[in-house]
């Protein structure tokens, strides 16, 4: 085996190693680009996730507020129903006992309204 043969063999091995080094360099660059893209997407997803969390917290707060408002309105409705019920019973009482004057009825309604405005139940 001659020196030229060894030099040729060495040249082929050098070419093979050089090609392999180029492929590895290309792979490294591709992985780097892919990693950067993935990091960008991850960052975007984190921002979107935070926005969604903020929206959920805001909506939960509104839901809680709406529940409180609904309960307050329901209490007010029950007070009104109770007041109407008391007035209706009194009207029936007045019809049964015809000698009760209209003035007494007006006084009763006035007292019930005054008591309601002061926050009372309207019960006599």
Image (cartoon, rainbow, N blue to C red):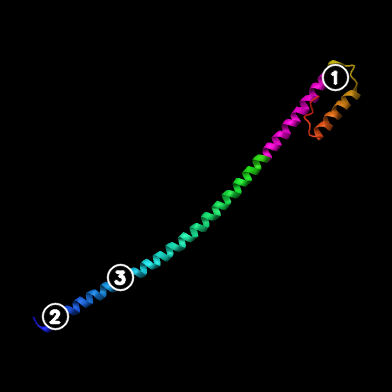
Is residue 99 located in the magenta-colored stretch of the structure?
A: no
- Residue at image location 19% in from the left, 80% down from the top: 11
Instruction: Tell me which numbered mark, 1 or 3, is placed earlier along the sequence.
Output: 3
Most extreme residue toward the bottom is 3
Which numbered tag is attached to residue 34?
Answer: none
Quadrant, the N terminus: bottom left
Residue extent of the magenta highlight: 69-95
Residue 58, position in %: x, y?
61, 49
Which residue is labeled 1 in the image?
94
Instruction: Tell me which numbered mark, 3 or 2, is placed earlier along the sequence.
Output: 2
Residues under numbered marks 2 and 1 in contact, where contact means CB atoms less than 8 Å apart: no
Give the Cα distance between marks 3 and 2: 26 Å
Residue 41, position in %: x, y?
46, 61
- Residue at image location 82% in from the left, 22% down from the top: 90
Which residue is labeled 2 in the image?
6
The secondary element bearing badge 1 is classed as helix
- Residue at image location 78% in from the left, 27% down from the top: 84
The secondary element bearing badge 3 is classed as helix
Residue 33, position in %: x, y?
40, 67
* 9 in relation to 51, above or below: below
Give the Cα distance between marks 1 and 3: 102 Å
């Amino acid at each position: 085996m001659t020196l030229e043969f060894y030099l040729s063999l060495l040249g082929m091995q050098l070419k093979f190693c050089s090609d392999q080094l180029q492929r590895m360099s290309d792979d490294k660059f591709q992985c780097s680009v892919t990693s950067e893209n993935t990091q960008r997407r991850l960052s975007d997803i984190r921002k979107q996730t935070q926005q969604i969390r903020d929206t959920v917290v805001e909506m939960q707060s509104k839901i809680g507020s709406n529940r409180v408002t609904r309960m307050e309105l329901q209490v007010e409705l029950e007070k009104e129903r109770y007041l109407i019920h008391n007035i209706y019973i009194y009207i029936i009482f007045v019809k049964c006992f015809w000698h009760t004057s209209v003035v007494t009825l007006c006084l009763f309604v006035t007292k019930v309204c005054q008591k309601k405005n002061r926050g009372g139940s309207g019960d006599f």
